Image: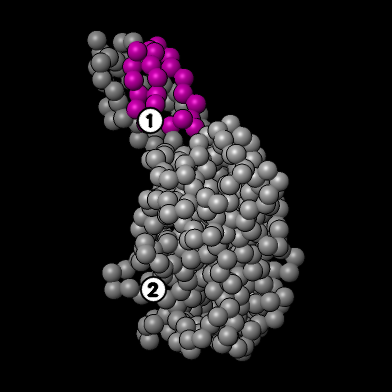
Amino acid sequence: MKKKIIIFVLTIFFLNCSCYAIDTVAVKNIGPGVKYYELATNEPLSIHLLEINLTKKISLDLCIANDGLGIGGECMSKMSKRMLDNGKIVLSGVNGDFFGGDPQQPENSMIIDGIFAKGTNINRSLFAFDFNNEPYIDSLPFNGYFNLNETKIKLSYLNILPIIDESAIINNYFKDDIELRKNQSAIVLIPQDKITINSLNKFKVINVFTKELSNILLLDKYIIITPTYFLDGKNIKKGDIIDVFLGTKPEIKNIKTLIGGLPRIIVDGKAIKSFIGLEGLTSPKFIGKNPRTAIGYNKTKDKIFIIAVDGRNAEHSVGYTLPQLSEYLVSIGCYNALNFDGGGSTTMVLRDSVVNSPTDLTGERKVHNGLFVCYTDSLKDIVSSVNISFDDDEISLTDNDEIKITAWDKWGFKLNVPCELITWTFEGIKGKIKDNYFYPESSGTGTIKWKLGEITGSFNIKVEE
């Protein structure tokens, strides 16, 4: 089917700032309340912009490369495809936080679907998005502690191994080896209910290790690593219930997504003109013209803007300085905004296709997390057309038949539709459909009918003994 994408072309559009006049604007509706703008100036500049209406059924979801810390980076296109394959309705996405360390991983705190994936205390701004679709940008250091016999013990980190005299908590996003240092102990816990951010959560102790930690498959388990002397006299044992607080300062309830960047580039509607010293910045090169990725929201918090600016190419796009990026985002309506990782990391995808021009000679760079715009309602509601065919219309009773499903959404993009989402009925024959295969259970000639939302179809098939 030919893709149906609404495209508006405006010949001249002037910014309400002192940056540059935009001489071409292409606009595509890519989802409910989500518009993608491709902009160009004679600087030259190539700008890719998402405008997201938060009153629609939209969410901003964080994804970690390879679903774990310390196991390598992943290209945004592959990250998006993996999310699509796992049932997320991804509309678009951009690269997120800066990364470093050994092994490399995102530098700042992270929350994914209401669960901490990393907690740290770097003095940087973070972007938070709650379950009510309200965005925030603030310095949000990790705040954690656990109670042992009415003694409050500070958790300095989440998914970072602690040093002497510090405690930390580990969950299944941590993929490196966990070893106890001298005079450290480990408390293995399992949550008693769904964990909530910035609230006390009850955990049951399932084991305590004071010398060497056995290999443990974390899954839904947590491990507190703490100096052994913190446990002296506490008589902590298997089966005990302890309270654990995992949160932020200031406390923001119901955080769904948390991701870091550097630095904050708009504060309460005001562009920032000088960045030296802000959040520890000292490098003029970092502040100068570069490819840029950033996120911002308007004063009423019902609209998000996400931008990717190409750079380091004199013929295609030279990039933005941080002051230019700040001024431009103010001009389009941002009230607060945060700079993400840029340079060769700057990448924007529509579904799982890259739309900007990454600067690395090898193309798209592997990054360590990404922020994705996702549709939160049923996939059935956005399907425009479906084509279903079987690999063979005549099969043996002892064989199986692959089902090929091709679908498009209302904006002309291909959809990944699992067969389990489709209603199947059989006439004249019996069988079952699983994992995109038909398994016959009787022989004969029959009809298989299917329904997805309001779209229906059928085809004939012959099953031989």
Furthest residue toward right: 300
Q: Is residue 236 visible?
A: yes
| Of 230 and 457, the residue lying toward us | 230
Which stretch did the figure color magenta? 419-441
Q: Amino acid at mark 2?
A: Gly
Q: Is residue 420 left or right of residue 255?
A: left
| Of 442 and 9, the residue lying toward us | 442
Question: Is the residue marked by circle 2 packed among few (<14), some (14-19), or many (20+) residues within 10 Å?
Answer: many
Residue displayed at 34% across by 20% down: 439
Residue on which disc 2 sits: 344
Q: Position of residue 311 (x, y in %)?
A: 42, 80
Residue on which disc 1 sits: 435
Q: Position of residue 283 (x, y in %)?
A: 48, 86
Label 2 to label 1, Cα distance in Å?
38 Å
Relative height, residue 250 to residue 151 (above, below) = below
Pointers 2 and 1 in contact (C-beta within 8 Å): no
Residue displayed at 42% across by 51% down: 180
Dot 1: element:
loop
Q: Position of residue 137 (x, y in %)?
A: 65, 67
| Of 176 and 24, the residue lying toward us | 176
Residue displayed at 34% across by 13% down: 441
